[in-house]
Image: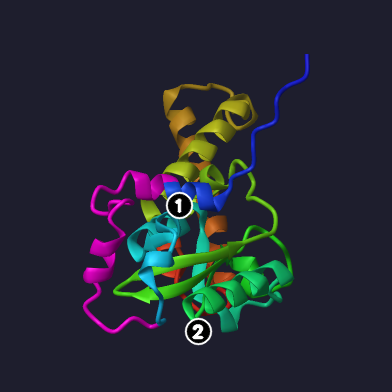
Amino acid sequence: MKLKLLPRTNIVNALSKTRSLDQEICQKQLNQIYESLEIKPLNDFNFDKLITEKIYHIRQIKKVSINYRLRFLDIKYFKNKLPEEANIEINKLEYDHNTKLGNFKIMAPSILFRLKKADDPLLFVPLGNNYYYLVHSWGNDLHPLRKLLMWPFKNIWNLLITVFAFSWLLTELTPISLFTRTPDSSSYWMLLFFMFKALASVVIYFGFALGKNFNPAIWNSHYNKA
């Protein structure tokens, strides 16, 4: 019997799920979103022609970016070229709304802002008042376990829990008889403390050496090693 592989994660679906849980935004009330704009829109759209399901608030973009360790930055930091399909979507929007779009944003994994790869980038354009319109998405979907793998990097407590869990696992797998002839509970806790200290030291060393930071600090940071 073949095991069914986990489906890869589509960030557009993750964003849509986050928005559906956010009761402050009603998908069927596009006019209310338009009226809520307190400043002149950065792009001159005809709101009657916009697709409501493609409108996202910065709060939802931030939440998904932190959960999956993604960056949300100006397009000038993006190392890849926009695919032809994205340019077609931009031209279509400009034609339909009789305007010229600008101030584009890209939502993608950090590596796409340093190297040329294809891992599910999303192209947004600002509407104003922290609302963004999804223009196009392309590339490969994210690894199905990415959210779980990025969980330790959300904050210091998640990281400590992860390090402790791995320390406990290594302690369970390590025969205490290698270190003492009379194993007891104190020997077990000493070994666990040693494992935790060793792993924590490695994590801290490489964290500082590589200039890494936690997800909430990097999701909109333009620094290369964040």
Residue at image position (42%, 44%) is: 17
Q: Please determine whether, in this image, residue 130 is positioned above or below residue 139.
A: below
Which mark identifies residue 15? 1
Residue 198 in view, yes or no = no
Q: Please determine whether, in this image, residue 150 is positioned above or below residue 37.
A: above
Residue at image position (25%, 47%) is: 23
Q: Quadrant of residue 5?
A: top right
> What is the residue that sits farthest to the top in this orientation?
1
Amino acid at dot 2: Gly
Residues 162 and 29: in front is 29
Q: Is residue 178 magenta?
A: no
Q: Is residue 40 magenta?
A: yes
Image coordinates of residue 19 in percent, x first then y, are 36, 50
Q: Are marks 2 and 1 in contact (CB under 8 Å)?
A: no
Q: Earlier in the sequence, mark 2 or mark 1?
A: 1
For mark 2, give the secondary structure: loop
Image coordinates of residue 182 in percent, x first then y, are 53, 21
Which mark identifies residue 35? none
Q: Quadrant of residue 144?
A: top right
Range of residues picked out in magenta: 17-42
Residue 108 in view, yes or no = yes
Image coordinates of residue 183 in percent, x first then y, are 52, 22
Residues 150 and 185: in front is 150
CA gap between label 2 and label 1 equals 22 Å
> What secondary structure is the stretch in magenta mostly built from?
loop
Which mark identifies residue 102? 2
For mark 1, give the secondary structure: helix
Residue at image position (51%, 47%) is: 13
Image coordinates of residue 55 in percent, x first then y, are 40, 61
Amino acid at dot 1: Leu
Residues 105 and 53: in front is 53
Q: Is residue 205 left or right of residue 56?
A: right
